[in-house]
Image (cartoon, rainbow, N blue to C red):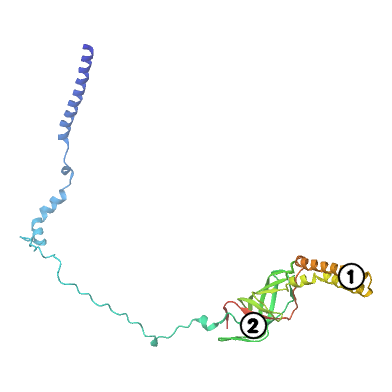
Amino acid sequence: MKFEYISSAKIYSMGTMKKIFTLLLIFFVFPMWTPAEDFVDDSIDSAIKTKYNTKKIEDDLLPALPEELPVFEDNVFSPSTEPSVVLPEKKQVQPSMSNTTPYVSNAAKTSAVLNSGKKFRVKLQNAVSDRTPPGTRLTFVTQYPETFRYITIPAGTIFKGRVKDSHPPYLSGNGGLIVIEVNEIIYKGASYEVDAKISVADGKKIFFNNIKGKRKFMKNMWNSTSFGSKFMKKMWKTTCSSLSKGGLDIIVAPFSFALGAVVYAGNVAASPVLALFSKGGSISIPANSRFVIQLEKDAVVLK
């Protein structure tokens, strides 16, 4: 126990010595610090003071301070009780149009509009059919002049188009198809884009721009009953012949007529199914056929 006490006393004395050494170091070093003023070079300021009377310069140049500051009243900044006055708005005067020259664009002077809905009577320069492949180019030539505002499209103007879609006759009596798209007009040697359709083809009205072959389902269904009708006629002749002979033939006569009737009725009942295996009408339009082209959108051309 004595040995531990002595060790603690030594540790305590060493800590105390460190504190004392730190205080002595601060005590002796602190007086050696020199204020920042000792490092300021005031030689220039001293030279100015010896040559000039700085006090007199300050009195001559600087204004004197007021002896007493003004006292502000409490209600100086109080809000006014009088209503504010709102000035009327000034009306903007529009410039008179009578003194101005209307602006006319150069495009309006040099271009003309072909209005939508206008029709051109033309002739087809190429032969076309429902077997013509899509993409085939076609040419049309106008037969009569067509007048618009500020412009007349003369006879002989060329329209160009293409076969957009086509197919030959299908089964079930479906006819062939030709869809023609007109997308170009040649006027005074220049080409312009147009959006037009065919409203008359080969002298016949066209709806929805589809040139359709005849649908022959009903006709084919009627034609498919030809076997039954022929058999029925044959059995009727046999019946009439048996009746004319007399005797036992009279007894057999009704059976031949009944057989013909049964076959004919069965043929009529099966005719819709038989008509599904027949095709519709095909389309073949020769060159120089009459067409009518109708604009679907306005087109712009140079005069």
Picture coordinates of residue 262 (x, y %)?
82, 67
Q: CA distance from mark 1 to mark 2?
A: 68 Å
| Image quadrant where one finds the N terminus | top left
Question: Do the residues under discs 1 and 2 have CB atoms within 8 angstroms?
Answer: no
Q: Mark 1 or mark 2: name the one nearer the start of the chain.
A: 2
**What is the crowding at mark 1: few (fewer than 14 residues within 10 Å), some, or many (at least 20)?**
many
Picture coordinates of residue 54 (x, y %)?
10, 56
- Residue at image location 10% in from the left, 58% down from the top: 58
Which label lies toward us, 1 or 2? 1
Picture coordinates of residue 152 (x, y %)?
60, 86
Amino acid marked by disc 1: Ala
Q: From this viewpoint, which residue is outermost toward the bottom?
A: 98
Figure quadrant of residue 241: bottom right
Picture coordinates of residue 147 (x, y %)?
60, 86
Q: Secondary structure at mark 2?
A: strand
Q: From this viewpoint, which residue is outermost toward the top?
A: 2
Q: Secondary structure at mark 1?
A: helix
Figure quadrant of residue 166: bottom right
Q: In the figure, is residue 265 to the left or right of 190?
A: right
Q: Say which of 225 and 22 sits in front.
A: 225
Q: Which mark is residue 253?
A: 1
- Residue at image location 17% in from the left, 29% down from the top: 23
Q: In the figure, is residue 259 to the left or right of 20?
A: right
Q: Which residue is mark 2?
A: 120
Residue 281 visible in this rendered orientation of the protein: no
Task: State whether residue 293 is above or below residue 267.
Answer: below
**What is the crowding at mark 2: few (fewer than 14 residues within 10 Å), some, or many (at least 20)?**
many
| Image quadrant where one finds the C terminus | bottom right
